[in-house]
Each structure stands twice: as C-alpha cells, then as structure tokens.
Image (cartoon, helix red, strand yellow):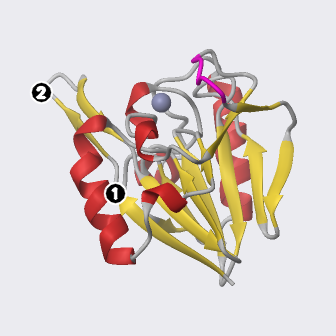
Amino acid sequence: MISLDILTIGSLVRDAEGNITEADSTSTLIRADGLNIVVDTSSKERKPHMKTAFKQLMVLPKDVDIVVLTHTHSDHIGNNDMFPKAEFLVHSGEKGNIKGARVIDSEEEEIAKGIRLVHTPGHTHGSMSVFVDADRKYAIAGDAIPLKENVQKMVPPGLNYDAKLALESLKKIIDYADMVVPGHDYPFMTDR
Ligand SMILES: [Zn+2]
C-alpha cells in the first residue's frame, strides 16, 4: 500500500507589483512498503511545520530513506538537514550541487513499485516530478506546476527557461494524474 501525506503546503507571496517576496515549497511524505520517501524539503522557515507534521504522522525524520528533490531552488531544499540517513536524488540537469546526492540521468526511473521519477523540464533543466500510482494517480510536480492556476489557464510557470517545454511538461503531468500536488499551492484534482 502507498500513502501520501503533505508535510507542509507551499505558498507564494507577491507584492502589489506582482513580484514574489516569499516562496516556500510543499513537502510531501510518501510511505510505501516500509519505505519513507520525502519529496522536497521546503524552506528553512517551514522547519517547525515539518517537525510537527512528522510527529502527527508518527514518523521520525531520521527514518526517511529517500529524499527526492524536484529541483534545487533554495525554497525546495531548505530542510535537507532533517534527513541525515536519507539518500538524496537529484536530476543531472540541475545546476545546484547537493553534496552526496545520487544523480538521476534518465527521463524516467522507478524508485519503488508504483513510484516513478519523471523528468519534467522547463522551470529548470533538471526538474523532476514524482508519479505515484496509489488509490488514485498522483503527481508531485514541484515547480513544473507551481500553482493550480497554471493548469486552469494552461500557462507554464512564470519562471522558466523554455516556455514551450515547460508547457509540454505540464501537459504530461495532467495527462497522468488524477490529483496534482503543486509546488506552491494546495493539491487539486484534474479533470481526467
Ligand atoms: Zn523553483
């Protein structure tokens, strides 16, 4: 059995001109056959939230086996230090250097039964999403889909190096998923 829990829900705060003044990513815990997998570790400011969530779920951070980083922006990697025993996974397209991480160099990789890393570039070169085949199909999208609004309006993330590629990645995610866990917003259902 695979279960998903949100450790902290991401957000983006903008000023009157629309510039982002604060960004904290979502962090998700996947539990699958005794394996604890965290996807993104949010920003340092969210550490208290993360700690409380782990307590409520009765999981110890030190018992996390794998940490998947959807990409290496600081608001997604701020609490990496909570997981001293985990193997960190980062895509080779990422420029940020995560010491000791295992580099994923493929378009797709299954890391456990029903759990796949899928390369979804556009926001960054090495952006990955995590596709989870559980009670329904979930995609933990990182900033390939930062907000629900991106899907409602079918627009790529504002911050991208290739808008066309970013939109292709977004489509790939919503083609698969019944429910999307975006990088900076509440999870939402697609209309698959
Ligand atoms: Zn980002």
Q: Quadrant of residue 93?
A: top right
Mark 1 Cα shell of 10 Å, populated few (<14), some (14-19), many (≥20): many
Q: Is residue 44 left or right of residue 72?
A: left
Q: Is residue 55 left or right of residue 142?
A: left
The first of marks 1 and 2 along the sequence is: 1
Residue type, label 2: Ala
The residue drawn where x is 48% and y is 45% is 150
Task: Relative to 11, say whether 2 is above or below.
Answer: below
The kind of secondary structure the magenta stretch mainly shows is: loop
Residue 22 place in picture, x, y as percent: 23, 31
Range of residues picked out in magenta: 96-100
The residue drawn where x is 46% and y is 70% is 5
The residue drawn where x is 87% and y is 36% is 106
* Label of residue 138 in the image: none
Q: Which residue is mark 2?
A: 16
What element does badge 2 sit on? loop
Residue 140 place in picture, x, y as percent: 58, 55
Residue 138 place in picture, x, y as percent: 63, 67
The residue drawn where x is 70% and y is 41% is 169
Q: Is residue 82 magenta?
A: no
Q: Is residue 99 magenta?
A: yes
